[in-house]
Amino acid sequence: MMSKFTSNAPAIDMTMVGFGQAGNRMVDLFAKLKKKDGTPVYNCLALNSNDGDLEGLQHISKSNMVSLNLGGLGKNPEKAIKIIEEKQEVKEKLKTFITERVRPSDELVLFFAGLGGGTGTSTIIKAIEEFNDYHNKPIIKEELLKLQKETDPKEFKQNLKRYMVRAMKNAENRTVKIGVVASIPVRDDGPDVLRQVNEFSQRIWKLARDKSKGISFVIFPDNQKFSDEFESLTESVKSGLKIDNYRDYANLQIRDIIHEINTATSGGGTSVTFDKADFKRLVLEHNGCLVLNKIEKNVKEVTNEHSIKEMFMESIGSSYLHDSIQLIEEDENGNKQASKVHHVGLLAVLAKDKPFSSSFIDSSKKALVEQLPINGTVFSGYLVGNNDYQVSAYTFYKTEALPSRLAKGLVTEYEEFRARQQQFIFKNSAIASIAATSEEDEFDSMDIDLSDFGISLDSPDEEPVTDSEEELDIDSLDFSDIEE
């Protein structure tokens, strides 16, 4: 159950676009959120490979659903992306969806997909490229042409990269920002899925690191984390949440944390406020992996300001949507290697009936700066309101590091699958034959020397064909025993 402050207006207006079944279901939960007048909080759209997969959506309007009419793609993103690239009508339909239906009137467009399937994994890659080519690249090109006209031709040519960077910076306030939410699958989906996820997550991360693409952040929710959490829930909790599988649980967690941080900063009402402008800077500036977390405790457990500081420090060390990120590591020589951390946000939501001094904000910021390799600004504040007798500590930051399972774990899991496979000797199956019982079979038991009749079974009636005379009969070749 989300807190009362989630009825605030969003700090950032967002369009949510789901690709494939997993992405559609994530966005469908955002479409469920309504304003007081009954209109949707977020503009939500869904694209899938066939009409059947769209039928299960309950909250996205039918007019915002688009099917590529491809049928199923069998959890094979490599096949799916090939179809999109080769079939002109499919390619055009996806392009039309991105250029005409996804209208970037909002400040941020969020693309959602699961990386364990076919449609979402492949179409989100193509969608990012199409969106950038249509909306952002022309703006950057326009700025580059301006610089070219203002610059000596020889100077421009010799320092082209420098002017390209300048053009991107000049275009930054006009380009449409993209956020990518791409969930990674559970281990039990098998080695082939893990291999493809590894490949496509690398492609997404490469796009995200390219500043010209306008991708403000990527979030990689981990279904393995959600699966483990869901299994640990009691039946009464599951019943209260009205969910019966880890996928629905995962989608709920993703929706709640994003919506909560996007509305909490619109609250105000205290002397130390984390406002909308601060939040927009944190989310929209720079690029990298956006890490969100929240720690909640009953008001009875939070006894003083030091307790809230401890909640902040606990929260910053982990993530709500995936496993931890190693921001500082040691190399073989004991040297510390750090990943950049851009802007950081600290936001507490306190209960009305238990006020605290705001000193916890200053002490938390001090402890945080000493602990993390921060390269930007620390934004902090708190709200006081009806929070269902809970104290909440939210932390969020953007970094150039990745969750541990994505950075290294998928490869380890894949190698473990391969190692288990090598324990087996794989056999070739054949259909057993039924022995014949004709009169001729009795010949083998007869003691008769055929040479007495001038007959030899060892001499064929015809001369054998030599190699030079033999022709290759393609139809007679047996490929059944050929191994790759």
Image: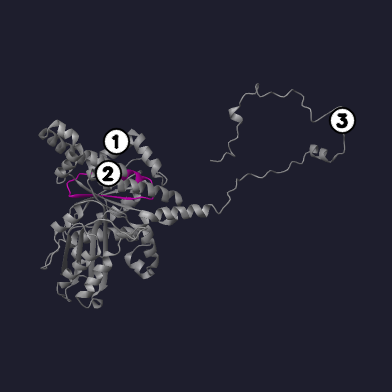
Secondary structure beneath dot 2 equals helix
Residue matched to label 1: 92
Q: Are marks 1 and 2 in contact (CB under 8 Å)?
A: no
Circle 3 crowding by C-alpha within 10 Å: few under 14, some 14–19, many from 20: few
Q: What residue type is labelled 3?
A: Ser
Residue matched to label 2: 128
205 on left or right of 442: left
Answer yes or no: is residue 41 visible.
no
Outermost front residue: 333
**Number of numbered callouts drawn:** 3
Disc number for residue 451: 3
* Residue 193 falls within the magenta-colored stretch: no
- Which residue is drawn at the image coordinates 25% and 68% (left, top)? 313
Q: Position of residue 347 (x, y in %)?
A: 19, 65
CA–CA distance in space, label 1 to label 2: 15 Å
Q: Position of residue 393 (x, y in %)?
A: 23, 67
Q: Where is residue 432 in the image (x, y as percent from the top left)?
A: 66, 45
Q: Which amino acid does label 1 sit on?
A: Glu
Q: Which of marks 1 and 2 is nearer the N terminus?
A: 1
Secondary structure beneath dot 1 equals helix
Q: Earlier in the sequence, mark 2 or mark 3?
A: 2
Q: What stretch is highlighted in magenta?
A: 102-124
Query: Which of the 4 image quadrants contains residue 376?
Result: bottom left
- Which residue is drawn at the image coordinates 19% and 34% (left, top)? 158
Answer yes or no: is residue 206 visible.
yes
From the image, state whether disc 1 or disc 2 is nearer to you.
2
CA–CA distance in space, label 2 to label 3: 83 Å
Q: Where is residue 169 in the image (x, y as percent from the top left)?
A: 16, 45
- Which residue is drawn at the image coordinates 14% and 31% (left, top)? 153
Secondary structure beneath dot 3 equals helix
